[in-house]
Amino acid sequence: MIYKTLQVEVVGRVVLIRLNRPEALNALNAAMAEELARVVARFEPDEGVGCFVLTGSDKAFAAGADIKEMAPRTFIENLSEDYMASWDSAARLRKPVIAAVAGFALGGGCELAMQCDFIIAADNAKFGQPEIKLGVIPGLGATQRLTRAVGKAKAMELILSGRMMGAEEAERAGLVARVVPLAKLVEEAMKTAQAIAGMPTAALMSAKETVGRAFETPLAEGLRFERRVFQALFGTPDQREGMSAFMEKRTARFHESKAAE
Ligand code: DAK
């Protein structure tokens, strides 16, 4: 498939998606939302795919929603078209997705990274929610996801001031899983993604869904859900294979002949 705003590459069991609008620092526009949705629809059901990596360029993961496209919009248009609602492809992925962030991740760009399961950041990454400077507020999840990730004090400070924070601060605050040198960002993210993609698919998808429940349910309900999913995984061949391999002191064979075409 040919994409105008993305570059897509399948490496082993990992789909590497690069946002590719260098002229606008990867600002998120309608065409990109539509193409990302197509990539997800194409690869998510593929048994040969175990993990996704979403990245940008060395200068920008994404500098936010496309301000030039957004500026003339009216309230009625936003309401009737449910503006930006189609930017939920990464959040809807049921297989793991890693954001590999270098440079600017601002506004909708930071929110897109937060839709992923975790963020690996280059040492030059800068995260921020500058919408306040444009007379609006975050609209793609930051008031909720950033607050859950870094706590109320830091989320309020970032959203109310529009200040950017660097990679080290973002890691200390819990927004970022790991910081790596810029030159190694994609290599490290791909290495992590290949390791994840080698795990048994049903367990991966179950683990992702169950951790996600921690943000949506009371503790007792989340623990009950976790226990039921744990119990159910004993109905999968991968549980037999994983535990047998351990006892036989050999490497488990989970995905033979299932690499994405
Ligand atoms: N949109 C469009 N073009 C952008 C852009 C953006 N967000 N960011 C950068 N560009 C363009 C610049 O206009 C420039 O284009 P030319 O002028 O060369 O044609 C080119 O990219 C290079 O940018 P700069 O020359 O500005 O580069 P610098 O290195 O000097 O500065 C910067 C980099 C990232 C600090 C600066 O570009 C900047 O401040 N960019 C805007 C950052 C920003 O405010 N982002 C937040 C956007 S608001 C919603 C959900 C979500 C959203 C909205 C609604 N609903 C559910 C309703 C999301 C909103 C946002 O993200």
Image (cartoon, rainbow, N blue to C red):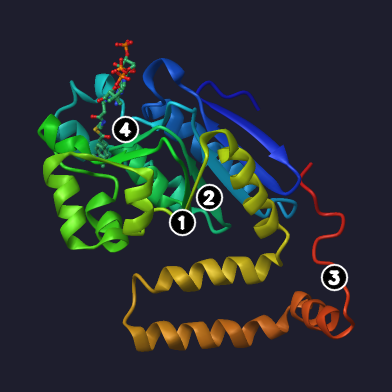
Instruction: Identify the mark at residue 177; answer none if there is no mark.
Output: 1
Give the residue type that dot 1 points to: Ala
Respond yes or no on whether mark 1 lies under 8 Å from ligand 1: no
Q: Quadrant of the N terminus?
A: top right
Amino acid type at mark 3:
Thr
Task: Tell me the crowding category of disc 4: few under 14, some 14 to 19, or many 20 or more residues within 10 angstroms, Cα based.
Answer: many
At x 46%, y 46%, the residue is 89
Q: Where's residue 83, x and y in %?
A: 27, 37
- Mark 4 C-beta closer than 8 Å to ligand 1: yes
CA separation in Å, label 4 and label 1: 21 Å
Which residue occupies 11% across, 45% down? Answer: 160
In the image: residue 156, left or right of residue 142: left
Task: From the image, tell me which residue sits under label 4.
Answer: 64
Identify residue for label 3: 251
Disc number lying in front (1 or 3)? 1
The residues tagged by marks 2 and 3 sit, at their Cα atoms, a distance apart of: 25 Å
The amino acid marked with disc number 4 is Gly
Q: CA distance from mark 1 to mark 2?
A: 10 Å
First in sequence, mark 3 or 4: give its number: 4
Query: Where residue 22 appears, x then y in whole percent?
Result: 45, 19
Q: Earlier in the sequence, mark 4 or mark 2?
A: 4
Q: Nearer the viewer, mark 1 or mark 2?
A: 1
